[in-house]
């Protein structure tokens, strides 16, 4: 089921995820890219059916050990950007409870490996001149303490062959269109140019979908709030931190067309 109204979301920078000790690894990106081109699309394979892929992609996991994954491609971007940015999801063959979200853009990959024990991030080592140099680290959650009584719910793990399992909100996947309003600070942190920020946003939403689809049966897809000015999947209002009512009204004018 797809809901065609647009959500207004303001992305800001926060320190909710801290980086633990990093491990530098070398990734054979040409081999991964070639394997990804042969993976099936969700339209043909079915939602969550990464097991139907005949391609096995090896990605570094804890300690840098290579683990086999099966992925399928799915669309969360406007048509204009789907050739430049590709998004995939799937699961580890050895342990189907480990989900994978992979984004391929600008000649590099960004990967989130999510399991009950934590979240492993794989991203390009920007400090290295080598195109194969990547960081592997565990994202540590440092959210503020909440004084609300905890509610413990038994977690369920996806079964083999199903990369999406809805654990708390039924079996109907609901899709929402998402329009993003960002600040100059976010633009700079995301790479400082349109291509880099588009890839950064796409990777972030791809990773968020990995959690939302499993926990609340919701998928976010990105729209271009600048349409028809550009195909960017964000609207940079030009400020540093504060949003004005005029800025929000201008954003709605573009996003809700």
Image (cartoon, rainbow, N blue to C red):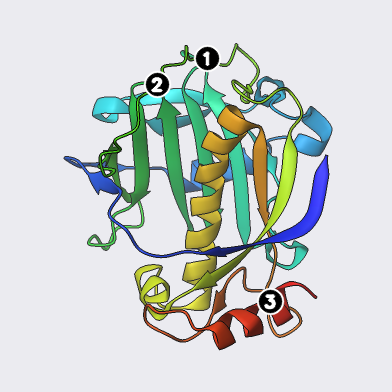
**In this view, 47 is above or below 157:** below
Which residue position holds label 1? 157
> Image point 78% across, 28% down: which residue?
46
Residue 80 against residue 162 in the figure, above or below = below
Q: Quadrant of residue 41?
A: top right
Kindly identify which numbered label has been placed on residue 246: none
**In front here: 48 or 177?**
177
Q: Quadrant of the C terminus?
A: bottom right
Residue 127 seen from this side: yes
Mark nearer the viewer, 3 or 2: 3
Q: Earlier in the sequence, mark 1 or mark 3?
A: 1
Q: CA distance from mark 3 to mark 2?
A: 38 Å
- The answer to whether residue 41 is seen in the rendering is no
Numbered mark located on residue 116 in the image: 2
Judged left or right of residue 141, residue 32 is right
The tag earlier along the polypeptide, 3 or 2, is 2
Give the image location of residue 1, x and y in percent. Answer: 83, 39
Mark 1 or mark 3, whichever is nearer to me:
3
Tag of residue 252? 3
Asked if 194 appears above or below 49 in the picture, the reply is below
Residue 97 % position (x, y): 49, 17
**Mark 1 → mark 3, Cα distance in angstroms:** 39 Å
Instruction: Name the residue nearer the viewer: 226 or 61.
Output: 226
């Amino acid at each position: 089921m797809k809901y065609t109204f647009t959500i207004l979301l303001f992305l800001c920078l926060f320190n909710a995820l801290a980086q633990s000790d990093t491990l530098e690894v070398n990734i054979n990106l040409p081999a991964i890219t070639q394997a990804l081109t042969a993976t099936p699309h969700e339209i043909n394979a079915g939602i969550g059916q990464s097991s139907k892929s005949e391609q096995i992609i090896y990605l570094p996991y804890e300690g840098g050990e290579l683990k086999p994954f099966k992925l399928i491609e799915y669309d969360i971007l406007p048509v204009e950007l789907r050739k430049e940015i590709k998004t995939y999801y799937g699961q580890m063959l050895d342990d189907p409870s480990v989900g994978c979200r992979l984004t391929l853009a600008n000649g590099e990959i960004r990967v989130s490996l999510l399991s009950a024990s934590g979240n492993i991030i794989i991203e390009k080592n920007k400090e290295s001149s080598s195109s194969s140099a990547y960081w592997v680290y565990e994202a540590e959650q440092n959210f503020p303490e909440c004084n609300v009584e905890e509610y413990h719910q038994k977690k369920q793990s996806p079964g083999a062959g199903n990369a999406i399992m809805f654990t708390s909100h039924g079996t109907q996947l609901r899709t929402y269109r998402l329009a993003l309003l960002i600040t100059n600070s976010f633009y700079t942190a995301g790479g400082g140019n349109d291509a880099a920020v588009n890839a950064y946003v796409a990777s972030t939403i791809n990773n968020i979908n990995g959690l939302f689809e499993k926990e609340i049966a919701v998928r976010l897809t990105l729209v271009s709030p600048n349409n028809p000015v550009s195909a960017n999947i964000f609207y940079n209002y030009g400020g540093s931190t504060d949003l004005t009512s005029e800025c929000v009204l201008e954003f709605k004018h573009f996003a809700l067309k």
